[in-house]
Image: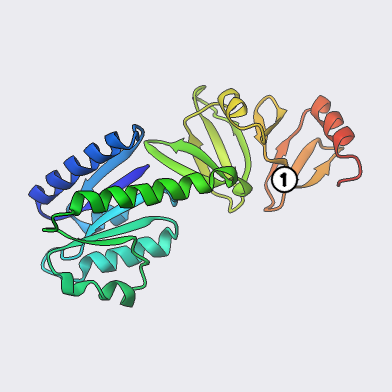
Amino acid sequence: MNIAILEDESIHIYRLTEIISSLLKDLGVSSYDLKTFKDPQALLAEPFIPSNQNIYFLDLELQGDQQQGLKVGQQIRDYDSQAALIFFTSHAELMPLTYKYKVAALDFIAKDSPTILDSIKEDFKLVLNKRQKNTSEMFSLQVGNHFIDLEFAKICFFETHYSNSHASILWLTDNRKLQIAKNLHELEQLEPRLSRVHRSFLVNLANVEVVDNSQKLLFFKNGLSCPISRRKLKLLQTKNKGSY
């Protein structure tokens, strides 16, 4: 889970950080990345990789602008359609503006609410339940200090990292490349839907479009390619005879 707090008052940052840490401990969540920001531009300069594990706590009023938090939320939503956005404010009358900005907020909480802890706890439960419902279609990975859930269908292949034996490189259907904090052996044990086609490559065969027998290459629907060993090629031909 990845959590970002955007708040320009230190006392509210401290209070919210304490609440979040306590609630996640109660919910049994030990792996999470928590960042705090006072400046909207600093947050927007390093957003989390899009994922349904991302939660942004945004103060509505920042630097004297009562709608600054909503503007930031709108930019996050344009970039990350899966993230949960939770707004905090001392001005409850601003709540209807969330609809104007079309940010699809998960929650809107008054800073002085006596039920703030219960509200945040319920929000965390909603995010965790959403993740569990999508487990069969998703693949959970650590990218740097962030934790993301990727649609398995968007994975093309993993390849051995050229200099780090404890990591690998993931290529996605949109041609993005991510460094993953697991090597191929660990990924192979973690996800049986992946196929080792070469000592340096682990593949999602569902996204293979063409098998080039002469060059011993697998071509993916987005134009990417990776090698396949002679032995694996024979096994693939036997298993999928007539499929390509």
What's the coloring here? rainbow
**Residue 115 located left or right of residue 225:** left
Would you identify the image quadrant in which residue 97 lies? bottom left
Determine the residue positioned at 81% across, 42% down. Answer: 211
Q: Position of residue 186 (x, y in %)?
A: 56, 24
- As drawn, is 206 to the left or to the right of 212? left
Where 68 sits versus 185, above or below? below
Q: Position of residue 51 (x, y in %)?
A: 45, 50
Viewer-proximal residue, 91 or 34? 91
Q: Position of residue 49 (x, y in %)?
A: 42, 49
Closer to the camera in the image, 171 or 96: 96
The answer to whether residue 188 is above or below residue 211 is above
Residue 47 visible in this rendered orientation of the protein = no
Residue 210 shown left or right of residue 106 in the figure: right
Q: Residue at (50%, 41%) from the top-left corner?
A: 178
Side (left or right) of 47 relative to 200: left
Q: Which quadrant of the structure image shows residue 18? A: top left
Q: Where residue 77 sits in the image (x, y, percent)?
A: 39, 63
Q: Which residue is mark 1?
A: 206
Q: Amino acid at mark 1?
A: Ala
State the image quarter where residue 72 is shown.
bottom left
Label 1: which secondary element = helix
Q: Is residue 181 visible?
A: yes
Q: Which residue is found at the position 13% from the left and 44% from the top?
A: 14
Residue drawn at x 20%, y 49% is: 117
